Amino acid sequence: MNNPGMRTFDDQWIRNQRGNKNRVDPYRPCHHVVERERTSAGVVEDVITLFLTNRECGYTCLMCDLWKNTTDTTVPHGAIPKQIEWALQRLPAARHIKLYNSGSFFDPRAIPPSDYGRIAELLQSFETVVVENHPRLTGERVFQFARMLRPRLQVAMGLETIDPDVLMRLNKKMTPDDFWKSVGILKEHGISSRAFILLKPPFTEEEAGKQWAKASLEYAFDAGSECCTVIPTRAGNGAMDLLQEEGHFTPPLLSSLEEVHAYGISMGRGNVFADTWDLKLFSSCDLCFEQRKQRLEQMNLEQVVLPFKDFACNIKQD
């Protein structure tokens, strides 16, 4: 892969590479899904995930494509509770819910703090509430919301990678130490956390991508995270597509995700999930893809490393 030196990417450059946003309704979540997930107690249960519609995240990370389903301004007071209420009226009951909002739940420009009380009321029947947040926004708003909740609060944060050069180029505006401190502060307030780990971000070779992802998993658990999700880096947001054209990024192999996922589970330090959304992008073989996807999904639920066996193409790796 070509070396772009120490080139960095600021908000304006990243935004200049984008296409158009999708049309969204501030009173409806842009997507919702019910999936099975293994809890920290080792039980597989249904989890509702609501992808809330709100103002675009202000951090403007290089690899992010979540801006596509966001508004340009802060949504009106009451809009976020309306989204949650609308979805819960249409979805089956579950004990756990994720409120993902294409950015940081505790960014007041995204989720108005004046809505916290009503949001907490709507969530009282759940056992666990997961929200996403930037490590540098860990503060009083988090604790205020947690005090309102009956369910247990978990905060999901993007560590991404502990490779310092790459993390800086991602325009994440944080360091691994920021993540570490945030996890510690949350623990002091009785709030758990989960980490998002990128597999093979831009400016990373395949083997190095695997090693940095493994090291990042170790770092997240050392910091005190309860679980981790490994996300294979993808193009599709404009900036990443240009970097791919220039030779600064190639998507990771499916076999790399399999290896890192297995490594994380074998650590035995907490749940490690492989993100299987749009997984076909990382496969080079149509014959074995479905079997390999099913293996990853089963490992997500069982948290044991399953053997490769009887693949249709008679291969074990890419």
Image (cartoon, rainbow, N blue to C red):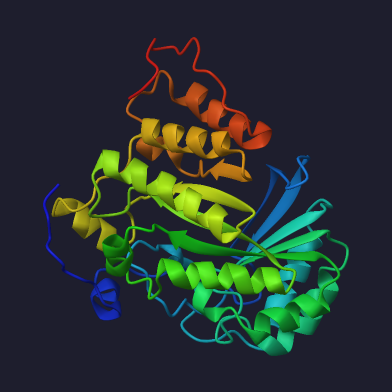
How many marks can you see?
0
- Front one among 248 and 178: 178
Residue 6: image quadrant is bottom left
Relative to 251, residue 74 above or below = below
Residue 47: percent from left, percent from top: 73, 50
Give the image location of residue 184, x and y in percent: 61, 69
Q: In this rendering, is residue 55 above or below 231?
A: below
186 vs 34, nearest the viewer? 186
Q: In this picture, is 156 found above or below 149?
A: above
What residue is at 63 percent from the left and 74 percent from the top?
A: 185
Q: Residue furthest front?
A: 222
Is residue 152 shown to the viewer in this render?
yes
Provide residue 25's location: percent of width, then percent of height.
58, 73
| Spot occupied by residue 283 in the image (x, y as percentages of width and height) | 37, 31
Side of 247 relative to 108 (left or right): left
Q: Residue at x 26, y 80 (%)?
A: 12
Relative placement, left or right, of 202 versus 247 is right
Q: Residue at x 30, y 75 (%)?
A: 15
Q: Between residues 188 and 60, which one lies in front from this camera angle?
A: 188
Image quadrant containing the C terminus = top left
Residue at the location (81% across, 68% down)? 123
Residue 36: quadrant of the picture: top right
Work out whether residue 134 can be spotted. Answer: no
